[in-house]
């Protein structure tokens, strides 16, 4: 069924990043695909996996992940490197994994990059790696920006 | 002994990235420290380790690594996201590890970010994670740029 909503147009990298985590939380693959730049150069590395390059591979990987259901993520200790047309963030993703009655917190160290295009800000890179256990530091640190 | 050379001033992120890998190959901590932005917001994640934030922590980590000697790295499959004042690269680092007579190739998936400052381009982020064994793909792929 065709989507009835318009493609999203993000006025800032913050909006695009927020939409990224909202799409994961609602397991909305269409929204997720919309916010990535549809380009052969985009890069995505999931924890423990090989790097994927190009939108079709990146989309397929998220389709596979979201087939497992919503992925609610809390972001912590975000640092930002900014320019008028490219932004990079470094943050810690806190993911609640529920297995039966056991609830576990998993932390992923992540970096995202966003590019300003005529269609608004788009995601061009996501890079995640499992944080070493018990070493999630500076989670309470204030957010910072370098630009 | 004070250094007799002038601080480096890089005219492009490519020059800064080249100097980064040259400093690792020559185990030159002073050169490495010079090319990072001396700022509380810079981020560095070594494979398997917690994220480090702020120049003093980042410098200390490289001091510890380079105390083990030179770190020659060949970079492969580099992808670049560019803007006039910020650049992000995604690449595969190939490191030759020699243990006695055994020579092993180790691959690290990495992302680097560079910011243009009045003192030239400076490194503001390095993020590395061990590549999954046997899954170093697209190493022969051509280099690409999105901007």
Image: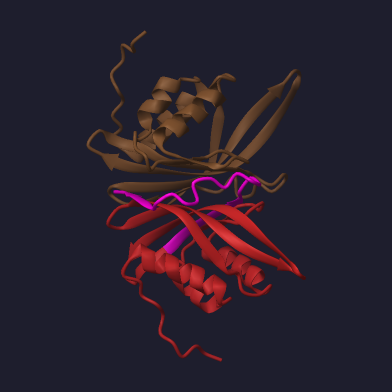
Chain colours: A brown, B red
Residue A23 pos. (x, y %): 45, 24
- Say above or below: B100 vs A115: below
Which residue is pictured at 40% across the width and 53% down the height? Answer: B88
Magenta span has A37? no
Which residue is pictured at 43% across the width and 42% down the height? Answer: A125
Range shown magenta: B123-147
Relative to residue A41, is residue B43 drawn left or right?
right
Residue B106 pos. (x, y %): 64, 57
Q: Is residue A146 visible?
A: no
Residue A144 pos. (x, y %): 45, 51
Q: Quadrant of the N terminus of chain B?
A: bottom right
Q: Quadrant of residue A119?
A: top left
Q: Is residue A28 visible?
A: yes
The residue sitting at the left extreme is A118
- Say above or below: A26 vs B65: above
- Say above or below: A119 vs B143: above
Which residue is pictured at 28% across the width and 49% down the height? Answer: A84
Which sits in the foreground, B86 or A81? Answer: B86
The residue sitting at the top extreme is A1
Relative to residue A111, is residue A4 drawn left or right?
left
The total of numbered circles placed on residues is 0
Residue B124 pos. (x, y %): 45, 60
């Amino acid at each position: 069924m065709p989507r009835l909503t318009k493609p999203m147009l993000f006025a800032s990298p913050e909006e695009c990043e927020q939409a990224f985590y909202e799409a994961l939380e609602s397991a909305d693959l269409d929204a997720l695909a919309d916010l990535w730049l549809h380009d052969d150069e985009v890069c995505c590395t999931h924890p423990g996996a090989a790097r994927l390059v190009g939108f079709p591979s990146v989309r397929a990987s998220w389709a596979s992940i979201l087939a497992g259901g919503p992925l609610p993520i809390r972001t912590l200790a975000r640092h930002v490197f900014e320019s008028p047309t490219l932004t990079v963030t470094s943050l810690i993703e806190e993911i609640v994994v529920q297995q039966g009655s056991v609830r576990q917190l998993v932390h992923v160290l992540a970096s995202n990059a966003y590019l300003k295009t005529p269609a608004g800000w788009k995601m061009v890179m996501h890079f995640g790696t499992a944080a070493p256990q018990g070493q999630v530091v500076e989670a309470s640190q204030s957010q910072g920006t370098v630009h």
